[in-house]
């Protein structure tokens, strides 16, 4: 019989692997240098280290959010990207830039959060019929909101030529401009948000059994859902406001983890956190080294892997978590 | 145990339960019966605190059901639903283990004692051999028994069951009913089989068009006259059993 909690050896193993990959990634890039010179190099301190840290933080955050969304919405095909929450955050960020809120430390993140929360609320209101959420309605709502939001963003870009570049950035996703400021903003949000999701691991399992069943087994369903949605949306909003929309991570990583570790969220969430960090780190390293010195958007790499997986899952229509 | 004080429930224009007043006796198996759509499930959901009546109130151990936290209530009342959500990949053992949730704190893992309780409940319901099976690999009856095991694992003094034996063959129906008798719970059970109710239940709440038309001993309630009124079929008693005249 499987134990229900995470295996500490798996956690240690994945952490070691992640640290090794971070070290390796810091050595790779447009400029080569010897391992011995690294610590003296400003490229390492000012560019590569914050970038590597951001990719690790954002990868962990997006994967944990995906795992949480799949339980809260009781649907294996959801993550913040598919439901349009990431796009909502990018719209908020774009509006903040146009309003000149960049000057404030929390300006862009705050607007992204407000817009993302609004998107989640809309999805929740539109897609829930009575107590249930139908897969088709949920996914179509997400698709429509994404289309609507990208149309609004295009509109904003046409109206504001001079700021087009900085807005495009939010719709594509890149770690190219990651700085220590981003790390300092993202790290506490990631720690707190992931902590909240880990704390509710067993509640996430019970939510999968249905709202009423979870309630009769002692879960304060409405409160738990609200706390989880706010915590995950906060994480997504901050990830998007510093790196833009990176698609499908929240879909791919929890699925891959479940194939190996089973459905229990007390294992899935911590494993997905570490695997997601590793996955986005590798994707970003590929993005900046494959065609060096030029760079690919990291979102294109995650989408090239993620979109076919999504289609495969739809095709197979396997209703398992 | 449970007191229903003048509860009225409706959705939109439609009233499901009209001014229903009853009490559930401790240590008894109470059958809730009546034709389809008469409000049986609604009544059970009110008792389980899953639905708030528009007027009146439900008292569990003398305290309004809404005043309990989900966790406190789940330590007193377990609920077996008629339809199960089964679109996940938990094994039967993991599903039954979920029934131990009301006794655990955040981040706390189930103890050996919890595992022993789960094993005992699964053996009682004849599902231990299914412990590694996933819901989609089980038959309807097997899944139903797993859900009964989960409710038993909650170790509550009160068990609410919405048609728990409807998916079972006759042998398993008898087995489950015997189990409920021997478990010495207070049980409220929605059941359709008149003779199963006569044999295994003590009391009867008979519903007809959202009104309670009988509250008392089951043998006094299931008489041909009343069966005709409620179900519109003719019946007679034969050797202490209800025989339907087709």
Image (cartoon, grey):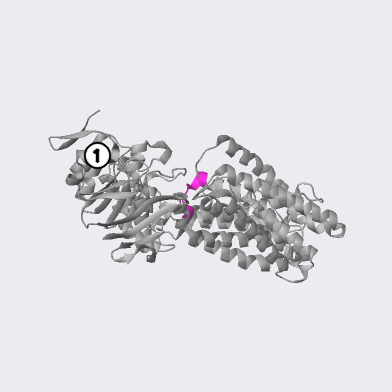
Foreground residue among B180 and A108:
B180
**Residue A312 included in the magenta stretch of the image:** no
Image check: A69 left or right of B183?
right
Residue at point 60% right, 63% down? Answer: A190
Q: Identify the element where label 1 is drawn.
A: helix
- Could you tell me residue B213's position as x and y percent? 27, 49
Q: Quadrant of residue A104?
A: bottom right
- For residue B60, which quarter of the picture? bottom left
Determine whether A151 is above or below B106 in the image: above
Chain of the residue on which disc 1 is drawn: B
Q: In the rendering, at what x and y percent does residue A72 appear?
A: 52, 53
Identify the residue under disc 1.
B227
Residue lying farthest to the bottom in this orientation = A104
Please give left or right for residue A161 compared with residue B204 in the image.
right
- Residue B110: image location, x then y, percent: 37, 57
The answer to whether residue A40 is seen in the rendering is yes
Question: Looking at the image, how many numbered discs can be counted on the residues?
Answer: 1
The image shows residue A208 at horizontal and vertical percentages of: 47, 50
Residue at 29%, 53% in the rendered image: B159
Q: Which residues are magenta?
A: A258-266
- Which secondary structure dominates the residues rendered in magenta? helix
Q: From the viewer's side, name the closer residue of A266 and A241.
A: A241
Instruction: Farthest residue to the left: give it.
Output: B239
Q: Using a 10 Å C-alpha cutoff, classify the residue at mark 1 as few (fewer than 14 neighbours), some (14 to 19) or many (20 or more).
A: many
């Amino acid at each position: 019989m499987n134990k229900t909690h995470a295996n500490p050896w798996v956690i240690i193993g994945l952490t070691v692997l992640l640290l090794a990959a971070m070290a390796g990634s810091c050595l790779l890039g447009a400029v080569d240098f010897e391992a011995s010179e690294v610590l003296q190099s400003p490229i390492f301190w000012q560019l590569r280290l914050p970038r590597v840290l951001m990719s690790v933080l954002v990868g962990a955050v997006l994967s944990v959010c995906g795992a949480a969304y799949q339980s809260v919405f009781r649907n294996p095909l959801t993550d913040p990207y598919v439901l349009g929450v990431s796009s909502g955050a990018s719209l908020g960020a774009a509006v903040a830039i146009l309003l000149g809120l960049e000057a404030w430390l929390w300006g862009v993140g705050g607007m992204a959060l407000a817009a993302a929360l609004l998107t989640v609320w809309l999805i929740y209101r539109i897609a829930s019929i009575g107590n249930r959420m139908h897969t088709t309605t949920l996914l179509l709502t997400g698709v429509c909101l994404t289309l609507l939001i990208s149309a609004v963003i295009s509109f904003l870009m046409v109206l504001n030529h001079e700021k087009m570049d900085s807005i495009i950035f939010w719709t594509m996703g890149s770690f190219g401009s990651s700085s220590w400021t981003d790390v300092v903003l993202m790290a506490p949000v990631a720690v707190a948000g992931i902590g909240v999701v880990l704390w509710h691991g067993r509640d996430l399992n019970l939510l999968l059994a249905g709202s009423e069943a979870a309630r009769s087994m002692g879960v304060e369903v409405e409160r738990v859902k609200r706390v989880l949605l706010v915590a995950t949306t906060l994480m997504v909003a901050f990830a998007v406001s510093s790196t833009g929309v990176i698609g499908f991570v929240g879909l791919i990583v929890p699925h891959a983890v479940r194939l190996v570790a089973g459905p229990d969220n007390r294992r899935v969430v911590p494993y997905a956190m570490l695997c997601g960090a590793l996955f986005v780190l590798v994707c970003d390293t590929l993005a900046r080294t494959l065609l060096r010195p030029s760079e690919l958007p990291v979102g294109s790499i995650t989408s090239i892997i993620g979109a076919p997986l999504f289609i495969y899952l739809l095709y197979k229509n396997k209703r398992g978590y | 145990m449970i007191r229903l004080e003048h509860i009225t429930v409706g959705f939109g224009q439609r009233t499901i339960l009209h001014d229903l007043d009853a009490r559930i006796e401790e240590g008894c198996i109470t059958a809730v019966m009546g034709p389809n759509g008469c409000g049986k499930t609604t009544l059970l959901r009110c008792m389980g605190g899953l639905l708030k009546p528009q007027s009146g109130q439900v008292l569990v151990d003398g305290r309004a059901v809404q005043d309990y936290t989900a966790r406190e209530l789940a330590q007193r009342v377990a609920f077996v639903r008629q339809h199960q959500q089964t679109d996940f990949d938990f094994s039967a053992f993991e599903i039954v283990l979920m029934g131990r949730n009301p006794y655990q704190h955040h981040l706390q893992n189930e103890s050996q004692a919890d595992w022993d309780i789960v094993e005992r409940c699964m053996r009682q319901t004849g599902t231990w051999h299914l412990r590694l099976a996933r819901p989609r690999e089980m038959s309807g009856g097997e899944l139903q028994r797993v859900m009964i095991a989960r409710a038993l694992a909650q170790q509550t003094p009160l068990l609410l069951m919405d048609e728990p034996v409807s998916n079972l063959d006759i042998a398993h129906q008898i087995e489950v009913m015997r189990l409920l008798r021997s478990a010495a719970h207070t049980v409220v059970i929605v059941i359709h089989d008149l003779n199963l109710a006569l044999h295994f239940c003590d009391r009867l709440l008979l519903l007809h068009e959202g009104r309670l038309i009988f509250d008392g001993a089951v043998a006094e309630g299931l008489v041909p006259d009343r069966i005709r009124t409620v179900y519109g079929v003719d019946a007679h008693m034969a050797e202490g059993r209800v025989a339907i005249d087709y």
